[in-house]
Amino acid sequence: MDAIDVIVTKRDGRELSREQIDWVIDAYTRGVVADEQMSSLAMAILLNGMNRREIAEWTQAMIRSGARMDWSALPGRTTDKHSTGGVGDKITLPLAPLVAACGGYVPQLSGRGLGHTGGTLDKLESIPGWRALLSNDEMLDVLRKAGAVICAAGDGLAPADKKLYALRDVTGTVEAIPLIASSIMSKKIAEGTGALVLDVKVGSGAFMKTVDRARELATTMVELGTDAGVNTVALLTAMDRPLGRAVGNALEVTESVEVLAGGGPEDVVELTVRLAREMLQAAGVSGKDPEEALKDGSAMDAWRRMITAQGGDPDALLPKAAETMEITAPSSGVLTGLDAYGVGLAAWRLGAGRERKEDPVSFGAGIMLHAKPGDMVRQGQPLMTLHADETSRFERALAALEGSYTIGASGDGGLLPLVIDR
Ligand code: URA
């Protein structure tokens, strides 16, 4: 077998055989298939698609490229959540300890932000001392102590995906549904969770801009999980406006702690509780109700244990940006639109995100929103505060926000419902 044979099969719109898939993933991981050959194959897949069998075999081959984690030593059931990413999406932070407080075990492997969407690890790293890199034994230890762990995936987990995702990122082949679905699910299946809830975001701030595309991705991932023996459920949720009021690393940690203390923005609380119930149900755990665990302090206790077990100080002051700038409402009326992509891009330009993988992020940078779509605003009232380490960043952030918010006579501009479908 050789790479050209595999590329030409897909280029000509034919099905890849199991042997071709196994061979090409293994040979690519070992460096026998070159990056330029794999990028050509990825483009052929993007243009010609893959059927369910091909996607399942591609996913299994990526899982086999590395190790599979095993949590059978834990005294309870594991359950996890994956979000396809969005602006202000800090849900993992309150969700993992909340589910732990209700009786589930959450072995959450998370990523860093690239582009306009934030990454869970960047957010948590704003907590002094907190460590994202843990060995498998350390993960097990944190799970035993806190019921939840959030950390980086080690090099041994689906290494084929690590290599392929970096390649897709620079060859215009990220957006292929078979490749996104197999990339996400290979990591989640290899992570060894027994149940999985997928939060597939829809709207300007998400990968999937339309409900139809999001539904196709969700269905594909649920099929992959189910076929691999992971009880998998997907929700389609709104990402046409930012989630919550905080966008940016330390700002989002503060908002997550507010949720764990029984407060926080309504949409963040609603989605956190909904996803917690789904995760517990998918795992067959019938413990405390998530709303109760937010009220009685047990979710906060689990958070403190989890942060402490990973070297962090849950009482430490979080980094603050040196400079702020307020944006005020240009007229009175109803805030009819607040575009997730514009806000995410502005936060990124303020320093909350990175341009290249190796760049550092500014922990204090980001945006606090003082009004959400549907709110009445008066001319001159603060709409949002920009936070950055240098004033020079404000100009490019303002350019990203141009046209991103609209004030009208009434309505919310036809926003998507927070939970669109299950
Ligand atoms: N996240 C992933 O892990 N993989 C993709 O392909 C897209 C998003």
Image (spheres, helix red, strand yellow):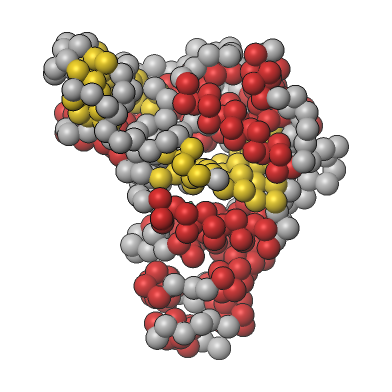
Q: How many marks?
A: 0
Q: Farthest residue in the front direction?
A: 410
Q: Measuring 50% from the left and 44% from the top, which residue is drawn there? A: 421
Where the N terminus falls, by quadrant?
Answer: bottom right
Considering only vertical position in the picture, is 38 above or below 97?
below
Specify the quadrant of the image occupied by residue 303: top right
Considering only vertical position in the picture, is 242 above or below 376?
below
Where the C terminus falls, by quadrant?
Answer: top right
Q: Can residue 120 be seen in this view?
A: yes
Q: Is residue 252 left or right of residue 138?
A: left
Q: Can residue 7 be seen in this view?
A: no
Q: Measuring 30% from the left and 36% from the top, which residue is drawn there? A: 414
Considering only vertical position in the picture, is 181 above or below 53?
above
Considering only vertical position in the picture, is 206 above or below 13?
above
Specify the quadrant of the image occupied by residue 206: top left
Q: Where is residue 386 in the image (x, y as percent from the top left)?
A: 28, 21
Q: Is residue 193 left or right of residue 362?
A: right
Q: Position of residue 318 (x, y in %)?
A: 47, 17
Specify the quadrant of the image occupied by residue 95: top right
Q: Position of residue 144 (x, y in %)?
A: 79, 32
Q: Where is residue 291 in the image (x, y as percent from the top left)?
A: 64, 21
Q: In this view, does 89 lie to the left or right of 73?
A: left
Q: Measuring 66% from the left and 39% from the top, which residue is drawn there? A: 279
* Nearest to the observer: residue 286 or residue 382: 286
Q: In this view, does 409 lie to the left or right of 303?
A: left
* Nearest to the observer: residue 215 or residue 66: 215
